[in-house]
Image (tube, rainbow, N blue to C red):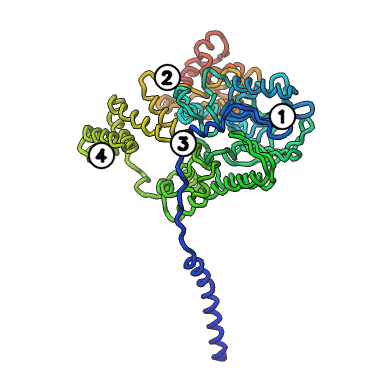
């Protein structure tokens, strides 16, 4: 081969290798680092000012579209049709729904032809019976909404109720709750207000078009705050109803009451679907409506950029090897996003959201080998207390920290103290003082009320309130299949590891049959007849559901014949004893 040709080829090869390197160097070497300026941190006074967002009023957004703001945690929306109306979200109790319905009837008293649930949360669905009364409307929702409704009422009710009580401040006197960030207050569980839930009758997976009262309505599945979230689009009015995928505060990309993983990338996609429809009216299910195509487009763009920023930067830091706590400490929303009134931290926070993203992609393990198999909490506390010279020394350190304004550190130290001496009165008093001090500093209502409610619950005379406790009317609608699933997560191993019991449940009002096996700490449920049961129970569905929910007494039901029993009553009682503390 000609030497000059070989030389030219070598030069070409070197240039091909060099060009990408130069391109990388240009990107890396020529770009200046811009320090990230944090947004202004809201104060408790800012939370007070935020209450203006929830002044009670029914707003006419455009001709035939009205939204009731400030009457409940979630808005209810009226869309007028020619001879029937549409209700989008129904508030959270019978009492609040009655208040809003009266106002809507003064505007237009047409019967309700359709109720639309934007998602499954109770503050949007528990007023449905009021709006449906006398009209028998179809109830539209995503195909998974019924399952999520049943999950919260059933297998997760105790823990969701307890944590919601704290987060929304329902454990506090009403006058201590300024607002809940997305609404004035959570009416569920307050003042004896009752749930009025109806399950969906019309569902869809991706998109659905239908007409009610001469109004063409389009529903789009739009995962975001919940997996079953949808948005409503009324083309002729250029009106869009985003549900809980947009409201005037930083969104709960994770909620401290507990939730399934909220997919931030999916949430961004859902907002993009909405903004490219270029709505002229945007009517959220929380906070006030917006109008103006450019204004709405810009607000939605800022909102989706805030969510995407948290997602993308969390993943970037994950890939650098940082754990969830480190990322939460490091991640801040840039000033141009964080200073937007629509991204102020009156509901969610970037720090909580970053931990949610980490967990959603990688699960609980933070990558640190010391957390793979940590010491039991009590043993850790014993070692820590020994390290500082004893329990009394640690209490003094915690007390001094509190006196010096180190409320968070003092609170964390009470964890160790109480693990060794549970219910120690002076430690509980110190812990309560820390919680009150931290709560009073907070402008984010979720964390503010969680601190203050946790402090209130340390009072000796505190009475726990189950805000999601269903009444008999809700129980009647609750699927028996979901109730059977609830039984599984109530099995107490210590009371059932020595048991092997087979039962048969038959329901006279539905002809459904369930074979149940309690087998050494595990409950198997099958929706068909399997021979060999030692006890056969026949009843109405609603009666058994009431017994399992605690509304009716098992012993009384056995005596008065509500349950018809054949076979071993001993096995039946042993079965129920395995489900209750």
Closer to the N terminus: mark 2 or mark 4?
A: 4
Q: Residue at x 51, y 27 (%)?
A: 157
Mark pair 3, 4: CA separation: 35 Å
- The kind of secondary structure element at disc 3 is loop
**Residue at mark 3:** 444
Q: Are marks 1 and 3 in contact (CB under 8 Å)?
A: no
Q: Are marks 4 and 1 in contact (CB under 8 Å)?
A: no
The x, y position of residue 342, in whole percent, is: 55, 41
The correct choice, above or below, for 154 with respect to 17 in the image is above
Q: Are marks 3 and 4 in contact (CB under 8 Å)?
A: no
The x, y position of residue 454, in whole percent, is: 40, 28
Closer to the N terminus: mark 3 or mark 2?
A: 3
- The kind of secondary structure element at disc 4 is helix
Q: Nearer the viewer, residue 369 or 292?
A: 292
Name the disc covering residue 463, or none. Answer: 2
**Residue at mark 1:** 86
Closer to the N terminus: mark 1 or mark 2?
A: 1
- Between circles 2 and 4, the one closer to the viewer is 2
Mark pair 1, 3: CA separation: 34 Å
Quarter in which the N terminus is drawn: bottom right
Left/right of residue 522 with respect to residue 94 in the rendered view: left
The correct choice, above or below, for 40 with respect to 453 in the image is below
**Residue at mark 4:** 383
Quarter in which the C terminus is drawn: top left
The x, y position of residue 554, in whole percent, is: 51, 14
The x, y position of residue 511, in whole percent, is: 66, 21
Q: Are marks 2 and 4 in contact (CB under 8 Å)?
A: no
């Amino acid at each position: 081969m000609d030497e000059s040709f070989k030389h030219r080829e070598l030069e070409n090869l070197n240039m091909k290798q060099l060009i990408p390197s130069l391109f990388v160097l240009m990107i890396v070497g020529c770009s200046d680092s811009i320090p990230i300026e944090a947004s202004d941190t809201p104060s408790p006074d800012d939370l007070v000012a935020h209450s203006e967002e929830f002044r009670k009023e029914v707003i006419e957004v455009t001709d035939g579209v009205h939204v009731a703001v400030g009457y409940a945690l979630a808005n209810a929306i009226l869309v007028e049709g020619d001879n029937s109306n549409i209700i989008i979200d129904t508030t959270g109790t019978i009492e609040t729904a009655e208040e809003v319905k009266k106002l809507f009837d003064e505007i237009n008293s047409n019967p309700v032809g359709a109720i639309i649930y934007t998602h499954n949360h109770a503050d949007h669905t528990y007023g449905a019976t009021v709006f449906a009364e006398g009209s028998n409307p179809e109830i539209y929702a995503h195909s998974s909404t019924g399952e999520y409704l049943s999950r919260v009422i059933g297998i997760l009710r105790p823990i969701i109720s307890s944590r919601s009580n704290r987060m929304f401040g329902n454990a506090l006197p009403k006058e201590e709750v300024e607002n809940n960030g997305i609404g004035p207050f959570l009416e569920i569980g307050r003042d004896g207000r009752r749930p009025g839930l109806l399950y969906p009758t019309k569902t869809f997976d991706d998109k659905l078009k239908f007409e009610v009262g001469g109004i063409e309505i389009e529903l789009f599945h739009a995962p975001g705050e919940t997996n079953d979230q949808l948005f409503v689009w009324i083309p002729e009015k250029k009106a869009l109803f985003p549900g809980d995928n947009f409201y005037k505060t930083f969104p709960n990309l994770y909620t401290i009451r507990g939730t399934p993983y909220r997919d931030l990338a999916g949430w961004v996609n859902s907002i993009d679907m909405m903004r490219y429809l270029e709505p002229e009216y945007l009517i959220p299910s929380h906070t006030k409506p917006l109008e103006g195509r450019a204004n709405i487009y810009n607000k939605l763009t800022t909102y989706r950029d805030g969510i995407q920023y948290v997602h993308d930067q969390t993943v970037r830091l994950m890939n650098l090897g940082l754990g969830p706590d480190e990322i939460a400490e490091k991640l801040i929303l840039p000033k141009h996003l964080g200073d937007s009134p629509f991204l102020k931290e009156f509901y969610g926070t970037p720090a909580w959201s970053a931990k949610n993203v980490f967990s959603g992609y990688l699960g609980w393990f933070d990558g640190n080998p010391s957390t793979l198999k940590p010491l039991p909490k009590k043993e850790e506390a014993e070692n820590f207390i020994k390290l500082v010279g004893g329990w009394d020394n640690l209490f003094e350190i915690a007390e001094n920290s509190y006196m010096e304004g180190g409320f968070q550190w003092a609170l964390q130290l009470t964890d160790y103290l109480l693990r060794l001496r549970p219910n120690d009165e002076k430690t509980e008093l110190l812990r309560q003082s820390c919680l009150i001090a931290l709560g009073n500093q907070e402008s984010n209502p979720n964390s503010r009320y969680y601190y203050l409610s946790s402090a209130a619950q340390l009072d000796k005379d505190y009475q726990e309130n189950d805000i999601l406790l269903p009444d008999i009317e809700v129980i009647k609608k609750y699927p028996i299949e979901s109730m059977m699933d609830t039984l599984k997560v109530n099995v107490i191993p210590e009371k059932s590891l020595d048991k092997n019991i087979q039962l048969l449940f038959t329901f006279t009002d539905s002809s459904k049959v369930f074979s149940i096996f309690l087998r050494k700490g595990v409950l198997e449920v099958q929706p068909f007849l399997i021979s060999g049961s030692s006890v056969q129970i026949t009843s109405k569905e609603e009666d058994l559901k009431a017994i399992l929910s605690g509304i009716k007494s098992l012993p009384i039901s056995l005596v008065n014949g509500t349950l018809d029993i054949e076979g071993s009553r001993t096995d039946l009682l042993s079965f129920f004893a395995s489900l209750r503390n």
